[in-house]
Image (tube, rainbow, N blue to C red):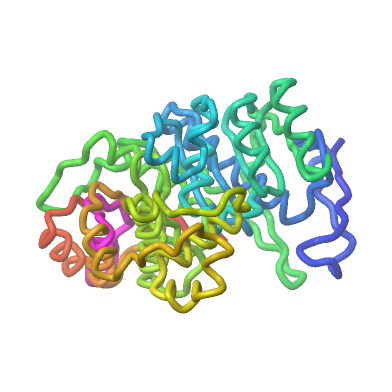
């Protein structure tokens, strides 16, 4: 089959809609359940490329959580601490390496991951299916599914959950095309291979130390950026993206947005947050939204009397600005990637506030000296890759 008709395009008024192979070959995917749409397939193909490259670069199984053609999260499989299992709400589940990777990808930014498209680098097992089963998700793409995992996923969304299987050996054409306003654009595919050697060629700061953990995290950040709508910045730690700032018009806004998400990820590990007295049987989306409000500066205003009782057994003491500031100061060992050069040192100043110690960026700004000087002030390690990673 080299063509699949879709219900509509990005919006219901955009008809007709289909995906097809111009060269007459068969599509590299099979729809095992549901009826994926135009945006679903955009997320599916972009997200699978990401996890496939992560797997090849690190040797670890990988997963991603996509929304509107950008990753809300991406991760490789590492053993989860009890704290992370709790804040990702998987402490009651048996976790395989692939399930751990998806729990991390989904859990880093649960607000953005709501209604996501999931991508898995390896065959979906029953443990990963059980994580997906109880989350609000539009669909999943993987190279295969065990029989038991497939049956579990087919029960989602009243039997309409989108399940796509992709040929892991599929190799796309070297030239790609895109139509905009009736005009066809053509370019070579971005086949840039990002590996550890890529990071070690030009370390420009006084501090030349790149730990193995930092190398893995920088690889993850850069590969994530390769499939994130530009401008984009990614913070990573312990084998997962903890903050992605996508589609912003200025670099500093990317850095702030991603940094704020990284801060929220870390604040969710604060003892006050982990011990919030939720009412029994609170819905998962309500719990996630309430945590987000509790961490914000608007807690007292939003959860006033008559409101907080819907979510908490007793009204929790607020997490003060000073407490948040002191907690975030303890965040360290964070890696940061940028899809284009940093034009000013203000990006480094903001990154430092969220525990960044390692940076990979293309370089090439007329103010590179200022950016390097700012990194040296904080004893950061920064490498220039010389390669831009714009994605549009």
Q: Is residue 339 above or below residue 280?
A: below
Q: Residue shown at 49%/47% (left/top)?
A: 107
Q: Is residue 238 visible?
A: yes
Q: Position of residue 273 (x, y in %)?
A: 39, 55
Identify the residue shown where x is 36% and y is 65%.
317
Q: Nearer the viewer, residue 270 or 265?
A: 270
Snapshot quadrant of residue 261: bottom left
Judge from the rendering whether residue 322 lies leftward or rightward of residue 94; answer left or right: left
The range drawn in magenta is 351-367
Q: Is residue 155 left or right of residue 140?
A: right
Q: Residue furthest top?
A: 147
Using residue 141 as the reference point, say whether residue 86 is left or right of it: left
Q: Which residue ends up furthest to the front in the rendered image?
A: 314
Q: Quadrant of residue 340?
A: bottom left
Q: Is residue 148 left or right of residue 6?
A: left
- Residue name at image x 50 percent, y 72 percent: 303
Relative to 300, residue 127 above or below: above
Residue 389's place in the image compared with 102, above or below, is: below
Q: Inspect the magenta stretch and tell me whether residue 359 lies in it.
A: yes
| Image quadrant in which the N terminus is located | top right
**Magenta region includes residue 201:** no
Q: Is residue 386 visible?
A: no
Residue 43 in picture, x, y percent from top left: 65, 50
Q: Quadrant of the C terminus?
A: bottom right
Q: How many marks?
A: 0
Q: In the rendered image, which quarter is residue 24 located in?
A: top right
Between residues 125 and 236, which one lies in front from this camera angle?
Answer: 125
């Amino acid at each position: 089959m080299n063509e699949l008709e879709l219900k509509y395009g990005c919006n219901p008024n955009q008809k007709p809609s289909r995906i097809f192979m111009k060269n007459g070959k068969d599509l590299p995917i099979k729809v095992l359940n549901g009826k994926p749409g135009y945006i679903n397939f955009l997320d599916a193909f972009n997200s699978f490329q990401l996890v496939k490259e992560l797997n090849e670069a690190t040797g670890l199984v990988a997963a991603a959580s996509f929304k509107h053609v950008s990753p809300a999260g991406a991760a490789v499989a590492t053993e989860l601490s009890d704290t992370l299992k709790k804040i990702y709400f998987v402490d009651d589940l048996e976790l395989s390496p692939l399930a751990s990777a998806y729990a991390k990808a989904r859990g880093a930014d649960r607000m953005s991951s709501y209604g996501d498209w999931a991508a898995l680098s390896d065959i979906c097992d029953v443990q990963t299916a059980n994580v997906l089963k109880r989350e609000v998700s539009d669909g999943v793409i993987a190279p295969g599914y065990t029989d038991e995992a497939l049956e579990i996923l087919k029960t989602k969304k009243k039997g309409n959950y989108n399940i796509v299987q992709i040929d892991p050996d599929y190799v796309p054409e070297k030239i790609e095309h895109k139509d905009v306003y009736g005009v066809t654009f053509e370019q070579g595919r971005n086949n840039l291979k990002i590996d550890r050697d890529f990071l070690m060629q030009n370390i420009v700061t006084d501090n030349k130390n790149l730990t193995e953990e930092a190398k893995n995290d920088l690889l993850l950040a850069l590969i994530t950026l390769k499939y994130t709508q530009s401008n984009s910045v990614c913070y990573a730690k312990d084998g997962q993206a903890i903050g992605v700032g996508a589609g912003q018009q200025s670099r500093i806004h990317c850095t702030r947005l991603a940094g704020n998400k990284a801060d929220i990820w870390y604040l969710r590990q604060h003892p006050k947050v982990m011990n919030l007295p939720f009412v029994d049987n609170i819905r998962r989306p309500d719990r996630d939204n309430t945590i987000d409000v509790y961490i914000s500066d608007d807690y007292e205003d939003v959860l006033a009397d008559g409101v907080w009782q819907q979510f908490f057994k007793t009204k929790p003491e607020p997490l003060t600005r000073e407490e948040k500031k002191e907690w975030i100061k303890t965040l360290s060992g964070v890696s940061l990637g940028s899809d284009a050069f940093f034009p000013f040192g203000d990006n480094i100043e903001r990154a430092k506030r969220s525990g960044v110690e390692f940076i990979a960026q293309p370089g090439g700004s007329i103010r590179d000296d200022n950016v390097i000087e700012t990194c040296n002030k904080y004893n950061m390690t920064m490498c220039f890759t010389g390669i831009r990673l714009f994605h549009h």
